[in-house]
Amino acid sequence: MLSARRSTAVVALTYFVSTLLTFTTAALTPRSNSIVVREESAASAFVYGVDGGNITFAITAVKSNGDIWFHMAAPSKYSYIAFGTGKQMDGSTMWFGYASSDGKGATLSPRTSGDHVEPEYSSKIKCSLVTDGFENGVVNKTLLVNGHCTNFTAAQSGKNGDSKLNFDSTQQSFIFGLGPTSHTLHSNDLDAGIRRHTEYGTFQMDLTKATVHDGDGVTPPKGAAAWTNSNSGKAEDVTTGDMDYIIPVHAVAMCGAFVLLYPGGVLLLRVLEKVMWHAWMQGLATIIAILGVGLGIKLSLTYNHSKSFNAAHQLIGLVVVLACVVQFALGYLHHRAYKRTQRPTPLGRIHRFAGPVILLIGITNGFTGFNFSDNAKDNIWYGAVVAIVLVVTVGLLIWARIRNGRRAKKATSQEFGLPAYEGMRGEGGNDSGGYDASRYGSNVHLGTM
Ligand code: HEM
Ligand SMILES: *[C@@H]1O[C@H](CO)[C@@H](O)[C@H](O)[C@H]1NC(C)=O
Ligand SMILES: *[C@@H]1O[C@H](CO)[C@@H](O)[C@H](O)[C@H]1NC(C)=O
Ligand SMILES: *[C@@H]1O[C@H](CO)[C@@H](O)[C@H](O)[C@H]1NC(C)=O
């Protein structure tokens, strides 16, 4: 009896103390983090099925101070999930969520964007993860991000009305984008490099149903809960399988020019001994390289890490392609002089020396390119192709040199011209324009590339 009464007293006292503690802690917690359900609770949620699960965006807005609270989720196989205000990237204020550097937590990065360029982190938009009692990070193959942005309506930068959140709007537009699954993005950096989305679209939300009046009464939309579409329209203008085609086209054009076309042009000259074919081939390679650089410049302007044109890959690439143009001019000038004088020229010597140097630097710039675009794994097959091409090219050049040595010997011993070159000598030669190996070869070492 007695002991029972005592234990009741203990329970009552414990209850009293713990209640007191709860209220005191709540009162002491800074305002921005106090999540005390007192009066209002409202949220609009957008849920959309994508490959691998749902993407979710649930938002609660606070009229009195312009704060927003939101919950974002997406299958973690996507390198990032992003939601943004408005109908298009240009002028939108966006929230990017991606895994933290250990791959377990979450990073929330508020960004703004111009039209179809990589969005840039903006420190003016004050957003942070909501941590107390909320789960952020990769949970069960889903990336969960719970965010709180203070004074959001004042900080957002939208130029046109649509890209600013209007809490009174029943049809507020939003955009979403999912990062490519082919890339991994684990970073704590708020300005981590982002690849172009593979899937994107727009949707509308009734924000009036998501707005509360007073910041004290807000119930932030919580994670893990199974959200369903509410106060929100369907996804529209959805594009899947999107990618930045300019990246691979740039890579194929540049690597193709330096690894296949230019070396091929060298072989046309040294092995097949077709001067004009050599000229056409190197001209074609140079045009492709110039077009490829055009794409490189376009790419540079698209991504934040390349905007300032100060990466080795960009600078070396520009110099190399400029050198290719000069090299073409040298080849042409040399050839013209040679046709007149039938003598080697200083320009020809520079051309012959610079050629392999430029090619090797250009080929090397492919490796730095893959590193620059965070694609180091592609260096493996690229390295294999480069190795094969080098072995084959050098092998054929050595073979051609030996062949020419033999021919020259035969020619001197027989005191004959070289039948194989006869037709190429002089003005009328079909595609040659005066490539006289008996002279040229002895002076210029045909076999040396
Ligand atoms: C010899 C010249 C060049 C070669 C061989 C070359 C090759 C490459 C390669 C292989 C890549 C990787 C693409 C991928 O990940 O699939 C790349 C990326 C890139 N290149 Fe070049 N490139 C050259 C010149 C240039 C120049 C002159 C510029 C600009 C001025 C440039 C700008 C870029 C940019 C910005 C990227 C990275 C794209 C990203 O952000 O992911 N490249 N390049
Ligand atoms: C993880 O997700 C699967 C499928 O979506 C679900 O069946 C399972 O209950 C989840 N596990 C946890 C711990 O949430
Ligand atoms: C919100 O930001 C604007 C301008 O940035 C400022 O004038 C205003 O005082 C801020 N309001 C609050 C509640 O912090
Ligand atoms: C996606 O959301 C719908 C409801 O909107 C739900 O029925 C479905 O189970 C969700 N799928 C997953 C994988 O969570």
Image (tube, grey):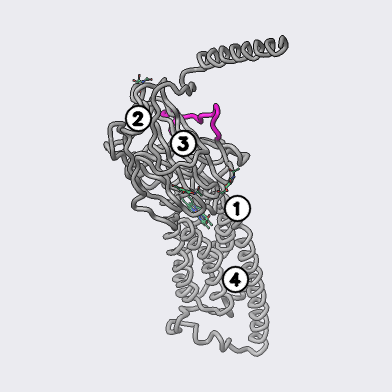
Q: Which amino acid does label 3 sit on?
A: His
Within 8 Å of ligand 1, the CB of disc 1? no
Residue 376 — which label? Answer: 1
Labels 3 and 1: the sequence-earlier one: 3
Dividing the picture into quarters, in which one does residue 393 lie?
A: bottom right
Residue 448, relative to residue 51: is it above or below? below
Residue 308 visible in image: no
Q: Quadrant of residue 16?
A: top right
Q: Mark 4 points at which residue?
A: 444
Read off the residue under disc 3. Answer: 71
Q: In which quarter of the image is the N terminus?
A: top right
Residue at horizontal 33%, vertical 35%? 207
| C-alpha gap between disc 1 and disc 2 | 46 Å
Q: Judging from the image, what secondary structure is the residue with disc 2 in?
A: strand
| Residue 339 picture location, percent across and down | 46, 75
Up-down relation of residue 234 to residue 187 (above or below): below
- Mark 3 or 1, which is nearer the eye? 3
| Nearest to N terminus: mark 1 or mark 2 | 2
CB under 8 Å between discs 2 and 3:
no
Depth check: 225 or 34 in front? 225
Mark 4 crowdedness (10 Å alpha carbons): few <14, some 14-19, many ≥20 = some
Question: Where residue 417 sits: x, y (%)?
Answer: 58, 87
Against 19, residue 425 (above or below) is below
What element does badge 4 sit on? helix
